[in-house]
Image (cartoon, rainbow, N blue to C red):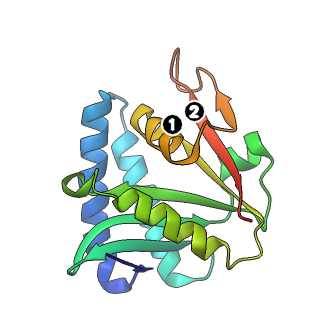
Amino acid sequence: MKFRKLKKSDKENASALFEACLADLIRREGIDEPGLFENEMERLNGVAVASLQYAGPCMYIAENGGILLGTIAVLPPGPMAVLHANAAEPDIEIGCVYIHPDHQRQGVGHFLIRSAIAKAKESPAGRFFLDAGFSSSRAYWTKQLGNPTITLEDYWGTGQPHAIWVKDLE
C-alpha cells in the first residue's frame, strides 16, 4: 500500500470513491436527511480541488496496484474544532477519511491515519483535531484514538452526538 498526495489525475477516481463511500455510509446509518449527500460531495470535492491548487489543505490517498483505496486530508482547523475545541493555527485537523466499501476492514484506515499523523508531525502543529458525527465513524475513531476529548450530546438530534478528538503530535 502506498501513501501519497492526491494528484490531478486522481480527482475523478477520488470523486467516485467519495460517491461510493457516502452512498454506503448513508444507507448503513439509515440517514434520511435531504441534501446531505450532495452537500458532503461538494465539500469533499472542494477539499480535493483546493489540495491541488494551493498549500492550504492537503489530501492524501492510499493506493494499491493503482487502485484508490481511501483518502485522508490534513487541513487547517475546521469550524467544529475552532468553535468547540479552541483549535487555532498552527493546529491541524485530520479529516476527509473515506475508505472504499470494498476495502474497508483491511487496515486501510489505520494505515491512512498513521501516515497522516507522520506528515502532520513534519508541520509546526503541536496537536491535531479529528471530529465525527456518524455513529460508525465515532465507533471507528474511538477504537483508533481512544475516547473523544469532547462529546457534543444530541448535536444531530436526540441520542445523536458529535465527537471531537484532540491529540498531541509529540
Q: Is residue 112 left or right of residue 84?
A: left
At horizontal 50% and vertical 48% (from top left) the residue drawn is 144
Q: Is residue 138 left or right of residue 2?
A: right
Q: Quadrant of residue 165 in the image?
A: top right
Q: Residues within 10 Å of mark 2 (few under 14, many from 20)?
A: many
Q: Residues within 10 Å of mark 1 (few under 14, many from 20)?
A: some
Extreme residue in the top direction: 158
- Residue 46, label in figure: none
Circles 1 and 2, Cβ within 8 Å, touching? The answer is yes
Pick the front one: 19 or 162 = 162
The relative height of residue 81 versus residue 127 in the rendered view (above or below) is above
Q: Quadrant of the N terminus?
A: bottom left
* Among the two numbered marks 1 and 2 on one chain, the one whose residue lies closer to the N terminus: 1
Q: Is residue 99 left or right of residue 145?
A: left
Q: Secondary structure at mark 2?
A: strand
Residue 85 in percent (x, y) is at: 76, 44
Pick the front one: 52 or 101 = 101
Q: Quadrant of residue 112 in the image?
A: bottom left
Q: Quadrant of the C terminus?
A: bottom right
Residue at label 1? 133
What's under tag 1, amino acid-wise? Gly
What's under tag 2, amino acid-wise? His
CA distance for labels 1 and 2 = 4 Å
- Residue 162, label in figure: 2
At horizontal 30% and vertical 37% (from top left) the residue drawn is 26
Residue 135 in percent (x, y) is at: 43, 31
